[in-house]
């Protein structure tokens, strides 16, 4: 089952969504750093996390897949959102400096095509911030939240996918350790769950957050070249008086 934009917007407006936004947003912006003067592209449903970016970046864009639907954002001023095929982005090569993916990779049929096109539109040295459900986490097993839909990933699966699409992970974080329960008691303990899970590096985090850079050159396998032995023609001694 695919989530549409109405479900996503309703989740982030709920108390559980507000806490989720705060926890995940802290991880995203910890990797993102300053975007002053940069061009930033969000893919999937990223608008809850683009508020601080939009007021600083030179340009902000948010593309949402047609299967999900699109919302007008921001609420005031010119809208920066549009429907798009996430595997065929309507941008030229090297058009943006940063790309943020949330509710995107796990929902597409061809993740490698998505990342290949992200690689195309990123500038040399551009960075990708990727948020993906953790295969071993509780959130991926509960379809009551957006992170319980689509294909979750293990760390090794993500590493292999990024290597195959020419991205090099530079930073890696797990977040969203609290259980996906709407009880006010559990929501009040969210900060304690994050401290506990991060401090002990527990494996049951809800999400992977990856900071990756664009590799400029495709690695080439080096094969050992066998040296050919140089062969010198044999010298034959011919007795005097006989034709050579």
Image (cartoon, helix red, strand yellow):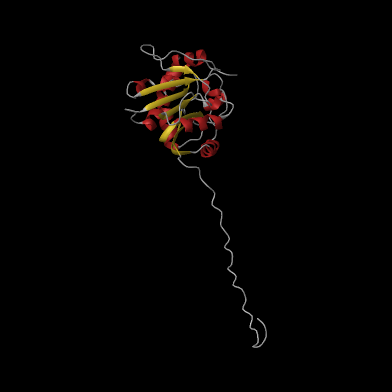
Please determine whether, in this image, residue 135 is positioned above or below residue 81.
below
Please determine whether, in this image, residue 98 is positioned above or below residue 240.
above
Counting from the top left corner in percent of width and height, residue 18 is at: 42, 18
Looking at the image, which residue sits at the far top? 76
Looking at the image, which residue sits at the far bottom? 240
Q: Quadrant of the N terminus?
A: top right
Answer with left or right where residue 57 lies relative to residue 111.
left
Q: Nearer the viewer, residue 101 or 81?
A: 81
Looking at the image, which residue sits at the far right? 242
Counting from the top left corner in percent of width and height, residue 91 is at: 46, 25
Counting from the top left corner in percent of width and height, residue 66 is at: 54, 17
Please determine whether, in this image, residue 2 is positioned above or below residue 242.
above
Q: Quadrant of the C terminus?
A: bottom right
Please determine whether, in this image, residue 60 is positioned above or below residue 197.
above
* Camera sees residue 42: yes
Q: Nearer the viewer, residue 98 or 178?
A: 98
Answer with left or right where residue 75 lies relative to residue 159.
left
Counting from the top left corner in percent of width and height, residue 194 is at: 42, 29
**Where on the picture, by quarter, is residue 150?**
top right
Residue shown at 42%/21% (left/top)? 61
Number of on-image labels: 0
* Camera sees residue 183: no
């Amino acid at each position: 089952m695919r989530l549409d934009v109405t479900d996503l917007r309703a989740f982030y407006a709920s108390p559980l969504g507000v806490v989720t936004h705060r926890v995940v947003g802290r991880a995203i912006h910890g990797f993102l750093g300053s975007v002053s003067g940069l061009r930033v592209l969000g893919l999937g449903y990223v608008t809850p996390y683009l508020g601080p970016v939009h007021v600083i970046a030179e340009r902000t864009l948010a593309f949402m897949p047609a299967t999900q639907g699109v919302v007008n954002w921001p609420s005031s001023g010119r809208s920066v959102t549009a429907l798009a095929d996430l595997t065929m982005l309507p941008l030229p090569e090297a058009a943006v400096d940063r790309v943020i993916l949330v509710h995107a990779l796990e929902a597409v049929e061809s993740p490698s095509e998505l990342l290949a096109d992200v690689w195309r539109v990123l500038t040399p040295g551009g960075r990708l911030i990727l948020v993906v459900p953790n295969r071993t986490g509780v959130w991926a097993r509960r379809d009551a939240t957006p992170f319980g839909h689509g294909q979750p990933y293990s760390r090794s699966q993500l590493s292999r996918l990024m290597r195959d699409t020419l991205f090099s992970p530079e930073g890696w974080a797990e977040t969203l350790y609290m259980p996906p329960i709407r009880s006010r008691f559990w929501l009040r303990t969210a900060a304690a769950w994050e401290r506990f899970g991060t401090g002990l590096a527990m494996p049951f985090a809800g999400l992977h957050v990856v900071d990756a850079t664009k590799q400029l050159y495709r690695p080439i396998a080096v094969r050992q070249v066998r040296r050919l032995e140089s062969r010198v023609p044999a010298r034959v001694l011919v007795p005097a008086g006989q034709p050579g």
